[in-house]
């Protein structure tokens, strides 16, 4: 029996799937006979952590809650050192006389990224399971990059030889071997999450899995399929309705507020031509929709924010605004200021005022930023007893400390820009935490995330404009995902260029 579960934004798809897992466990199904596989590692980890908490089962007892790539890696007995990494691609480029600066597989989702157009085309052909020259002829690669057809074919062949000679595999090689060797475990129940993002190669692996499963649940939302550029095949997911026994739609969103935000999201998604027709209810709370003509009008001084754009470089003005206003933010998984530095400043200001003594770990962190204000020979903290706490007077007398000045004078090596930004943060009384309250992200990277307040930049790249001419569904789905991240308020900034913008 096969069932599709459609999970519109915020409808609790993971919760629903784990409730089904619970039902099977209560009915006596062995946890080792339940397979739960997702497109992203983040989703797999979330399922594992929830299962641990909900079912009181240690994660080591849950062997088949993972990504498809992880399943292939584990089942085939592949070692980490056998995986093709960035230095290997650079070495391959050197041998072939082509420049490769970056080439890597994103560990979260197995998507290949590279600055080299040839490698991108080769990979996309592979995940779509078509010859590389057929992919070239589709003209999906950047039209403004000079890609030679014959050279593309030769590089594809040379890359296969290189991996074979070095004993290396890439993420997609693992999936191919898994299917070819027919090593799929047998499951009483199989769950496939985030199915809208699967590539043709991954779908072949899924079919291998469900051929050995008694019951299969395939969960996803075609409206949130935004990885076609990486080879994802949402059309297969939509066509599955002809093969399965049942299609269920979760119809209550616990994220999206009623009113203008929900109305805008629906007006966007109705433009998509090929989709499951579905309706769901928003929360009763009415959300706010606000528009701005200039970035300086946006007030992010309070609350949790997610700032979204179609490309990272559109976020530069937002970064400047945050630093001017003293708002703490994160971008590309990096905090705008290192947490260690902020904690060192915070701790130093209390310490120098003789408010308390400090453990050695905190003092060492402070010392790492004091530079020449700690006598040479004491900077590593080797004179401290790790089990003791010390006040600032003791460190001044016995452990090389040479200053008790305010942080911006005491901390050696801070540039003026960083100092001013931190001053603004302290004046703004920004909360210091591992995860800042403002997250700057591309829409693709934020898929699955949410925030009380979302600021959306509707600017799009030239390649997105070209792609929109070919397949406008791609952009509709992308901005639908963006709009549906907001739990309370959605803020839209006017584009810099209306000819290169998504109209909201």
Image: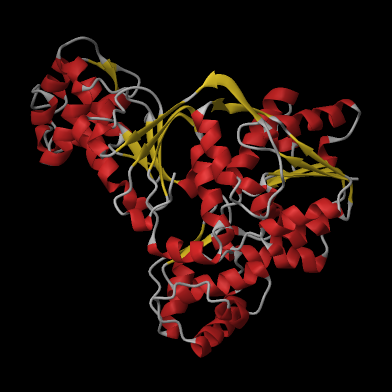
Query: Quick check: can you spot residue 54?
Result: yes
Give the percent coordinates (x, y) of residue 174.
68, 64
Q: Look at the picture and state if 109 lies above or below 387.
A: below
Horizontal placement of 349 versus 278: left or right? left
Quarter of the picture holding the C terminus: top left
Quarter of the picture holding the N terminus: top right
Horizontal placement of 82 versus 315: left or right? right
Residue at the far bottom: name it.
150
Q: How many marks?
A: 0
Query: Quick check: can you spot residue 364?
Result: no
Give the percent coordinates (x, y) of residue 189.
85, 42
Question: Residue shown at 15%/17% (left/top)?
Answer: 352
Residue at the far top: name it.
355
Give the percent coordinates (x, y) of residue 364.
26, 30
Q: Nearer the viewer, residue 325 or 289?
A: 289
| Colour scheme employed for the rendering of this structure | secondary structure
Q: Nearer the viewer, residue 41 or 285?
A: 285
Question: Residue shown at 34%/53% (left/top)?
Answer: 498
Question: Residue shown at 40%/73% (left/top)?
Answer: 100
Give the percent coordinates (x, y) of residue 408.
11, 29
Q: Nearer the viewer, residue 504 or 493?
A: 504
Horizontal placement of 411 versus 442: left or right? left
Quarter of the rendering containing residue 307:
top left
Q: Look at the picture and state if 256 lies above or below 88.
A: above
Q: Nearer the viewer, residue 9 or 352?
A: 9
């Amino acid at each position: 029996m096969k069932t599709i579960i459609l999970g519109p934004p915020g409808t609790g798809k993971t919760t629903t799937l784990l409730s089904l897992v619970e039902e099977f466990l209560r009915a006596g199904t062995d946890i080792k006979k339940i397979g739960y596989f997702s497109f992203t590692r983040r989703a797999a980890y979330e399922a594992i952590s929830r299962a641990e908490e909900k079912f009181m089962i240690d994660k080591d007892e849950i062997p088949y809650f993972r990504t498809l790539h992880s399943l292939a890696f584990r089942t085939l007995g592949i070692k980490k050192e056998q995986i093709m990494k960035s230095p290997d691609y650079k070495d391959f480029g050197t041998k072939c006389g082509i420049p490769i600066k970056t080439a890597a597989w994103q560990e979260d989702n197995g998507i290949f990224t590279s600055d080299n157009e040839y490698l991108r085309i080769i990979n996309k052909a592979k995940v779509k399971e078509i010859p590389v020259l057929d992919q070239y002829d589709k003209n999906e690669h950047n039209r403004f990059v000079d890609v030679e057809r014959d050279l593309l074919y030769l590089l594809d062949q040379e890359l296969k030889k290189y991996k074979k000679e070095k004993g290396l595999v890439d993420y997609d090689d693992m999936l191919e071997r898994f299917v070819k060797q027919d090593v799929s475990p047998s499951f009483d129940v199989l769950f496939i999450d985030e199915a809208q993002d699967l590539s043709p190669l991954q779908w072949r692996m899924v079919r291998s899995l469900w051929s050995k499963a008694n019951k299969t649940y395939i969960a996803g939302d075609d409206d949130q399929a935004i990885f076609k550029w990486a080879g994802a095949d949402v059309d297969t997911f939509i066509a599955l309705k002809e093969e399965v026994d049942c299609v269920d739609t979760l119809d209550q969103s616990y994220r999206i507020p009623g009113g203008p935000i929900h109305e805008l999201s629906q007006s966007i998604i109705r433009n998509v031509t090929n989709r499951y027709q579905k309706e769901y209810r928003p929360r009763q709370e009415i959300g706010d929709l606000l528009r701005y003509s200039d970035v300086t009008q946006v007030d992010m001084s309070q609350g949790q924010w997610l700032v979204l754009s179609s490309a990272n470089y559109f976020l530069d003005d937002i970064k400047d605004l945050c630093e001017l206003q003293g708002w703490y933010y994160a971008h590309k998984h990096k905090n705008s200021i290192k947490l260690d530095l902020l904690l060192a400043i915070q701790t130093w200001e209390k310490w120098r005022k003789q408010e308390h003594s400090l453990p050695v770990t905190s003092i060492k962190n402070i010392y790492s930023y004091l530079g020449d204000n700690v006598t040479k020979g004491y900077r590593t903290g080797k004179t401290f007893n790790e089990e003791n706490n010390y006040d600032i007077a003791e460190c001044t007398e016995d452990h090389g400390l040479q200053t008790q000045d305010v942080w911006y004078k005491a901390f050696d090596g801070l540039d003026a820009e960083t100092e001013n930004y931190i001053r603004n943060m302290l004046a703004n009384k920004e909360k210091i935490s591992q995860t800042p309250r403002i997250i700057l992200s591309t829409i693709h990277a934020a898929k699955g995330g949410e925030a009380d307040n979302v600021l959306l930049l509707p600017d799009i790249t030239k390649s997105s404009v070209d792609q929109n001419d070919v397949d406008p569904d791609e952009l509709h789905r992308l901005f639908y995902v963006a709009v549906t991240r907001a739990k309370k308020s959605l803020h839209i900034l006017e584009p810099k260029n209306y000819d290169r913008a998504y109209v909201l």
